[in-house]
Image (spheres, rainbow, N blue to C red):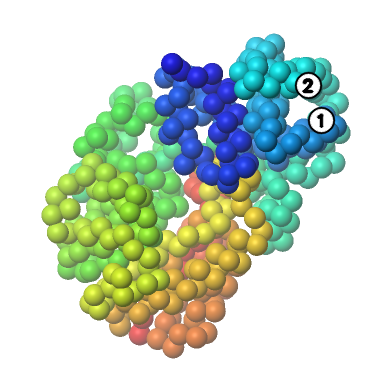
Amino acid sequence: MASDVRLVAAQTLAAILVEGKTLAQLMPKAADRVAPRDQPLLQELCYGTCRWYPQLKQLYLALVDKPLKAKDTDIEALFYLGFYQLQFTRIAPHAAINETVNCAKKLKKPWAVKLLNAVLRRAQREQESLQQELQQNPQATTAHPNWLIKAITKHWPDFAEAIFASNNAHPPMTLRVNRAQTTRDDYQTELVEQGIECQATEYSDVGITLARAQDTAKLPGFAQGQASVQDEAAQLAASLLDLKPGQRVLDACAAPGGKTCHMLETEPGLARVTALDISDKRLTKVQENIQRINRDWLQGQVELTAADALVLEDWFSGDQYDRILLDAPCSATGVIRRHPDIKLLRLANQVEQLATLQFELLTALWQTLKPGGRLVYATCSIFPTENTQVIERFLQQTDDAAEHKLAVTWGMEQPAGRQLLPRQGGHDGFYYCVLDKR
């Protein structure tokens, strides 16, 4: 029997707040618990509440006098869900309040019914004055946690407001056209003929951004691999590798496999691509993507390897690579609009920890690159700590490494590499630096 959609949403949010789990981990099982017709609402409630959580939290603190116990985080989550529905959806206020309050009964916490009802009704009644009060609170006005406000303002003072706005917006759906099967112009024509409004991306020569998100099952040739969903910024990686027939390529931290597939679409004559990821489970997604686009690649051209990239003896045979893509684990501060739970989960001290890991990965993988080879370092972070500073430290201690300066129009030149900031309606935030081995 299907569960109440708001109840499932509250339990999902509570799992993020208490257990530190991500939306990506929680949503598949959560969606299975509700009726198919309620799945879009579940998605809206979970993602929307996370997107605006810092603002909703300030509203909660203003309206709820006594903090709830840790065991009642599910009730706290109902407050956030109620506020979100009242402020950001077209759901009728009485329905939003009544259905949310009813969840407290279903959780067998009757004490919370009266409190929820009173607070949500006050939030509806005094919405304008409450919003006015919160105008002095940066966490409320930007919908970002304090540490993130400070970091973004420090590193990008001239772009901070635009970054906040981009992070709070719905992300566009962008496709990568498989040039091994069709052309961007031809595929765009097919989309238009099916009534799908779209436009070619500015920087990627195989990208198309849709005016509205679509079910991939309805996209022409999607099941046959004619197109894949991938942000424009991520599509830039393959061209930076300067791929040639016969090369051996390592895609480190490869899951979910979008860049692996793009490499082979760009240069079908590659001798071998090793898709390396620490998670065996995530490599399954890489395999699924490859099978959709071209299952023949799995007959020897692509090697899926589950191992820790730092532990070379577990996976590296000693035969060095011509090209390496290191899409390093990062704070993901360039893709907050796609993963709004970052606002709840990421902590300031994690940025430095990630920078240490990124440096270690870069240092380890450099040993697996041939002299004359190329490594592309990429993150979806917007912080120099994880980008320029990692590269500068690496170059200072690595005699056979040199930055290959990029003659491109996208992004902003940094002391090392180029930075793309998230753009509303456009690409995500991304950083790239190309390193050649002498």
Would residue 361 appear left or right of 239 to someone viewing this image? right
Residue 338 horizontal/vertical position (percent): 52, 42
Would residue 329 appear left or right of 313 to someone viewing this image? right
- Looking at the image, the residue that sits furthest to the bottom is 399
In the picture of the structure, the residue carrying the numbered disc 1 is: 64
The front one of 351 and 105 is 105
The front one of 336 and 361 is 361
Disc 1 crowd rating (10 Å Cα; few below 14, some 14-19, many 20+) is: some
Residue under the image location 45 percent in, 52 percent down:
233
Residue 419 in view, yes or no: yes
What amino acid type is highlighted by mark number 1? Answer: Val
Q: Is label 1 in contact with label 2 (beta carbons under 8 Å)?
A: yes
Residue under the image location 30 percent in, 66 percent down:
250
Would residue 184 appear left or right of 30 to someone viewing this image? left
Give residue 166's mark.
none
Disc 2 crowd rating (10 Å Cα; few below 14, some 14-19, many 20+) is: some
Residue under the image location 55 percent in, 33 percent down:
12
What amino acid type is highlighted by mark number 2? Answer: Leu
Q: How many marks can you see?
A: 2
Q: Quadrant of residue 110?
A: top right
Would residue 261 appear left or right of 127 to someone viewing this image? left
| First-in-chain label (1 vs 2) | 1
Residue 213 horizontal/vertical position (percent): 44, 31
Give residue 115's mark.
2
Q: Check the picture and name the quadrant holding the N terminus.
A: top left
Q: Describe the element under mark 2 as helix, strand or loop.
A: helix
Asked if 80 appears above or below 4 in the picture, the reply is below
